[in-house]
Image: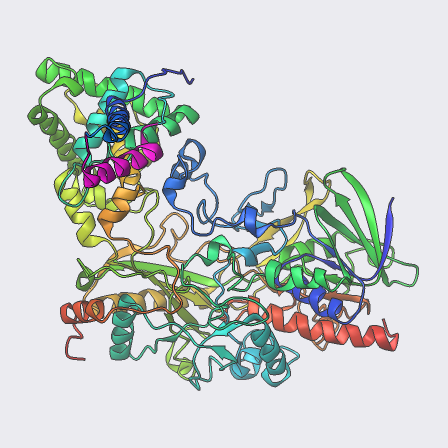
């Protein structure tokens, strides 16, 4: 077995691992960064500014696979490497469970295409149990994390406006672009109903920082940005980390096990070199897992030794437990006020320019569910693609009136999506399927998942609110968005891709896996720097908090290495 | 199963001829036979579009009868009007041919569907679809739409109906329009998609994005238009 030595080995080159490698590398610490996929080359891999007609298949992909539900997840233009299923790398679900697991195997991971919503958790979010007696408190408070949010936001670049809303703490913002027409209508509707729409907070820069150009408003963040005007771990963390000269990225490296030495400390990581299909070892003084919540838990559960027969650092038995996703619900409608609207460029900075933070945070005693949600929005004159007008064509028939109808209705659609907090529960977890290994010989995760009444009632509140908003704007509700995935009126677990919580932090080693620095209670040189660390899953998209906590853990680890404690 | 037919559409040939004539005229211009610059620009623009959509395209899957039927359907389903050209100009026949050459399931929908259409047309009019008069062709499409409405009601979603997937395609009796609905739905879907993803269709829609701006601005005219038509006109 080939062996190499570093100060730290980091598993996973996404938001958490990228931040970790960059911060450590900048401090002169020698890092091996393992990535299960290939290196990314923006010039080659990003389809920025392309048109559908640049391709014979018009983005329907070879043989029109997109029409058959077999196209690239989120569309041909999107930069992903992986998806809901990966050939030869299955995952399983317990009977009665439906769970969708999105994996992106490439440097930068899912941050190459993600929505870039960047919301701070609030003081309420870090201490939910203290407030309503449900779930668990984090071992850290908003005050502990705020300085790290500051640093992460200043480095990444996040838009927004200072609003003073307790459930949505303000940050270090870049100026946001002005709202689009349909967003102004929804804001007016929200005003009538008491739902506040404010400037969206997205990881996009509108002034130049760190040699990155400001946004040019092509609206194509999901394709990857050639000017790095948005945050992606690849361009903003991993590339700068490599430039320090202290970080070596090892691609096509599928981690299978954390190795443990005689004294029960981590000694390195064994991975499968995918090109050679053989095992290799990276030895290091410390190991940081940032492979995404479920890959990290899988790796820990698969790391069995005489010290840790049930998985490394799993004395509590909580590795894999309390898996959470976001409660997702969407409603679509049309706004007749927008028919034949004078055309303008609605691309903007790649997502909605407004969103509604949770506004009833002080009114839970009047509601039948304990936690909140925020509202995201879609609409505008979008670049046409396969299926853009299929429903309209069906409703109209064919011929001259079809063309007329499409001109009239183009851009009148509105979509509202709720993103709500799920309460961690005993029925939602992942373990290792005893009967299945992947093509690399690694046992695979098995998912168990169940929403409780807390989530169902919250989703019904979303449904009522979205209907009221659309109707207040004079619109017509078209039905639940994407029926296939939301057939029960709540998005399929995992499908919002906010899965977190499989190796949670806490002060008590009996009821948590990690301490408040995301350091394993039982293995002092083992750290976690992804969403696995989350104690709860507030209605805030997790990436910014992963960045902030990883940065905080990196500084702590650096200090512990310097002191010789690790 | 893909078969190389090795012919190009008539329209493409005529445009190529136009290019040749222009090329001759430009050469001849030196001899005193001029050509209006606007005409030259027009043809050059046509030729550019042709390059993208038609000119260089060699039909890969369908035979001439099938391809001609697709061309006619593309003209009827998305007809030329004051806002833009037809689905045929948008490259719909080529789009369907390319995808069909790569996907047998899709190819079967179209080859079977065109046979059904010709059979139904023969029964009704004594002529194959592409050879029938426009009046008869639109009468046939009107029948298909009527059958579709009867079958589908107001449900226009793609993924909630069984025949969203190719599973119930088949010729029952030519007089029963329902047999042709899967094919008609696919043909319309792909023709509409091809047109609106072509430069002409994008222009028709008025999509002005995929651009680069130093600052993002929303025009007052658009804001006022929508507000004036909304419940918030006084807000």
Which colouring convention does the figure follow? Answer: rainbow
Q: Can you tell which quarter of the image residue B55 is in?
A: top left
Does A513 sit left or right of A208 as displayed?
right
Would residue A137 be visible to someone looking at this image? no
Residue B231 in percent (x, y) is at 16, 72
Specify whether residue A371 is painted magenta: no
Residue A384: x and y in percent read: 32, 48
Name the residue furthest right. A262
Can you say which quadrant of the picture contains the C terminus of chain A? bottom right
Overall secondary structure of the magenta stretch? helix
The image position of residue A439, as x and y in percent, is: 69, 38
The vertical placement of B226 against A429, above or below, is below
Which residue reaches farthest left? B135
Q: Is residue A398 depicted above or below A455 in this figure? A: above
B180 and B80: which is toward the camera: B80
The stretch in magenta equals B33-55
Taking A440 as reference, is B48 left or right? left
Question: Which quadrant of the view contains residue A24?
Answer: bottom right
- Depth check: A493 or B120 in front? B120
Q: Residue furthest front?
A: B31
- Counting labels gives 0
Quarter of the image for residue B111 reads top left
Does A445 sit left or right of B37 as displayed? right
For residue B46: magenta?
yes
Front-most of residues A386 and A320: A386
Q: Position of residue A533 (x, y in %)?
A: 65, 68
Q: Quadrant of the N terminus of chain A?
A: top right
Q: Residue at x 17, y 44 (%)?
A: A403
- Image height check: is A116 above or below A94? below
């Amino acid at each position: 077995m080939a062996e190499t030595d570093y100060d730290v080995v980091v598993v996973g080159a996404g938001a958490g691992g990228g931040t970790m490698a960059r911060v450590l590398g900048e401090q002169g610490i020698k890092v091996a960064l393992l990535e299960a996929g290939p290196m990314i080359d923006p010039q080659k891999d990003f389809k920025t500014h392309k048109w559908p007609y640049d391709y014979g298949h018009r983005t329907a992909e070879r043989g029109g696979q997109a029409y058959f539900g077999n196209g690239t997840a989120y569309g041909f233009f999107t930069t992903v490497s992986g998806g809901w299923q990966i050939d030869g790398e299955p995952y399983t679900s317990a009977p009665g469970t439906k769970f969708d697991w999105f994996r992106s195997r490439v440097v930068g991971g899912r941050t190459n295409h993600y929505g870039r919503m960047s919301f701070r958790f609030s003081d309420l979010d870090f201490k939910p149990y203290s407030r309503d007696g449900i779930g668990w408190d984090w071992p850290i408070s908003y005050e502990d994390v705020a300085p790290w949010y500051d640093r992460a936001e200043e480095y990444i670049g996040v838009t927004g406006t200072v609003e003073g809303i307790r459930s949505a703490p303000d940050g270090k913002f870049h100026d946001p672009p002005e709202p689009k027409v349909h967003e102004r209508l929804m804001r007016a509707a929200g005003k009538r109903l008491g739902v506040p729409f404010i400037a969206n907070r997205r990881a996009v820069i509108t002034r130049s920082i760190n040699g990155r150009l400001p946004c040019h408003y092509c609206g194509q963040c999901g394709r990857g940005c050639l000017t790095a005007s948005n945050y992606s771990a690849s361009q903003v963390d991993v590339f700068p980390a490599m430039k320090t000269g202290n970080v070596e990225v090892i691609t096509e490296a599928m981690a299978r096990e954390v190795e443990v030495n005689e004294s029960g400390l981590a000694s390195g990581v064994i991975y499968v070199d995918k090109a050679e299909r053989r095992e290799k070892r990276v030895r290091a003084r410390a190991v940081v897992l940032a492979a995404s919540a479920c890959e990290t838990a899988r790796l820990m559960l698969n790391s069995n030794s005489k010290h840790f027969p049930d998985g490394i650092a799993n004395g509590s038995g909580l590795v894999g437990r309390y898996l959470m996703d976001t409660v997702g619900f969407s409603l679509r409608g049309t706004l007749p006020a927008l028919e034949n609207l004078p055309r303008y460029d609605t691309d903007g900075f790649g997502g909605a320019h407004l969103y509604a933070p949770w506004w009833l945070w002080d009114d839970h005693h009047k509601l039948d569910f304990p936690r909140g949600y925020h509202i995201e929005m879609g609409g505008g004159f979008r670049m046409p693609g396969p299926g853009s007008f299929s429903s309209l064509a069906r409703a109209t028939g064919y011929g001259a009136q079809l063309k007329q109808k499409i001109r009239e209705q183009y851009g009148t659609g509105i979509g509202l999506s709720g993103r709500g907090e799920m309460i961690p529960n005993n029925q939602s977890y992942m373990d290792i399927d005893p009967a299945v290994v992947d093509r690399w010989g690694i046992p695979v995760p098995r998912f168990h998942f169940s929403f409780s009444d807390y989530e169902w009632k919250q989703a019904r509140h979303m449904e009522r609110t979205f209907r009221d908003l659309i109707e207040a704007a004079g619109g017509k509700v078209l039905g639940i968005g994407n029926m296939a995935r939301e057939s029960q009126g709540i998005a399929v677990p995992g499908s919002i891709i906010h899965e977190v919580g499989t190796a949670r932090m806490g002060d008590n080693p009996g009821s948590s896996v990690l301490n408040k620095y995301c350091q394993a209670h039982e293995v002092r040189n083992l750290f976690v720097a992804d969403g696995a660390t989350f104690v709860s899953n507030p209605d805030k998209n997790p990436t910014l908090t992963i960045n902030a906590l990883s940065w905080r853990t990196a500084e702590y680890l650096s200090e512990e290495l310097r002191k010789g404690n690790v | 199963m893909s078969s190389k037919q090795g012919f190009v559409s008539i329209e493409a040939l005529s445009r190529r001829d136009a290019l040749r004539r222009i090329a001759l005229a430009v050469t001849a211009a030196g001899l005193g036979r001029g050509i209006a610059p606007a005409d030259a620009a027009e043809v050059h623009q046509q030729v550019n579009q042709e390059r993208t959509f038609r000119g260089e395209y060699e039909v890969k899957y369908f035979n001439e009868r099938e391809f001609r039927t697709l061309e006619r359907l593309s003209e009827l389903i998305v007809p030329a009007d004051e806002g833009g050209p037809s689905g045929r100009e948008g490259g719909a026949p080529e789009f369907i041919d390319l995808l069909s050459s790569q996907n047998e399931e899709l190819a079967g929908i179209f080859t079977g569907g065109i046979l059904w259409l010709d059979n139904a047309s023969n029964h009704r009019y004594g002529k194959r679809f592409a050879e029938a008069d426009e009046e008869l062709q639109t009468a046939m499409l009107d029948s298909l739409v009527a059958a579709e409405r009867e079958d589908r009601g107001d449900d226009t979603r793609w993924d909630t109906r069984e025949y969203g997937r190719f599973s119930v395609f088949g010729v029952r009796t030519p007089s029963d329009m329902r047999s042709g609905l899967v094919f008609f739905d696919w043909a319309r879907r792909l023709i509409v998609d091809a047109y609106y993803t072509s430069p002409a269709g994008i222009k028709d829609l008025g999509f002005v994005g995929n651009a680069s701006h130093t600052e993002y601005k929303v025009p007052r005219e658009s804001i006022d238009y929508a507000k004036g038509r909304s419940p918030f006109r006084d807000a």
